[in-house]
Amino acid sequence: MNTTSWKNTTPQQKNLWDYINASFHPTVIVPLYFQGIAATSEFATYVATKLYLALDFKIAGTADTAAISFVSVYDESNALVSVFGNSVAYWNTTNARYVHNFFVLNNFCFGKLIFSGYTNIMFNGYRLTI
């Protein structure tokens, strides 16, 4: 899916695009690539007319923590729909610690993301105005 005509898609991307197009009728389609700090991204702010189509989404943390790391995914109506994480526990001499492992998500849409523990992201996809 490398143009807004959607002609070079995988079957999964075609199904997702057909669902988005039929459900939301996007009026503006903007290719978007972001690589950087999750906290500085626009993805954590909900806007009712904005929907993201992630073709490739990678996330990683930079240090261990006392808390489990996860990403909360919200839909177009700002309702929580999924929580993703890939943390591994280990113990130091006094308590449990967690390492947040890198993970990849492909072909999903969302209205907002909330990051807990993960710090770095890479998003390749589209911002849709609905």
Image: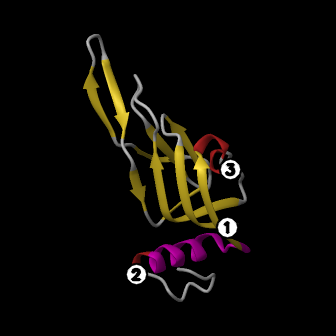
Residue occupying image coordinates x 53% and y 50%: 121
Front residue of 68 and 99 = 99
Mark 1 residue element: strand
In the figure, is residue 110 to the left or right of 48? Answer: left
Mark 2 residue element: helix
* Nearest to viewer (mark 2 / mark 3): 3
Q: Residue furthest top?
A: 94
In the figure, is residue 30 to the left or right of 5? Answer: right
Q: Is residue 41 magenta?
A: no
Q: Which residue is mark 3?
A: 42
What's drawn in magenta, residue-wise?
Answer: 13-28
- N-terminal label among 3 and 1: 3
- N-terminal label among 2 and 1: 2
Residue occupying image coordinates x 72% and y 59%: 49
Front residue of 84 and 34 = 34
Q: Which residue is mark 1?
A: 128
Q: Residue 27, image x and y in percent? A: 73, 74
Q: Residue 130, image x and y in percent? A: 70, 66
Mark 3 residue element: helix
Residue occupying image coordinates x 48% and y 73%: 16
Crowding at dot 1, Cα within 10 Å, few <14 / some 14-19 / many 20+, comes out as many
Q: Quadrant of residue 6?
A: bottom right
State the mark number for residue 11: 2
Asked whether disc 3 touches disc 1, contact meaning CB atoms under 8 Å apart, the reply is no
Q: How many numbered discs? A: 3
Q: CA distance from mark 2 to mark 3?
A: 28 Å
Q: Amino acid at mark 3?
A: Glu
Q: Is residue 47 above or below residue 118?
A: below
- N-terminal label among 2 and 3: 2
**Dominant secondary structure of the magenta stretch?**
helix
Q: CA distance from mark 3 to mark 1?
A: 13 Å
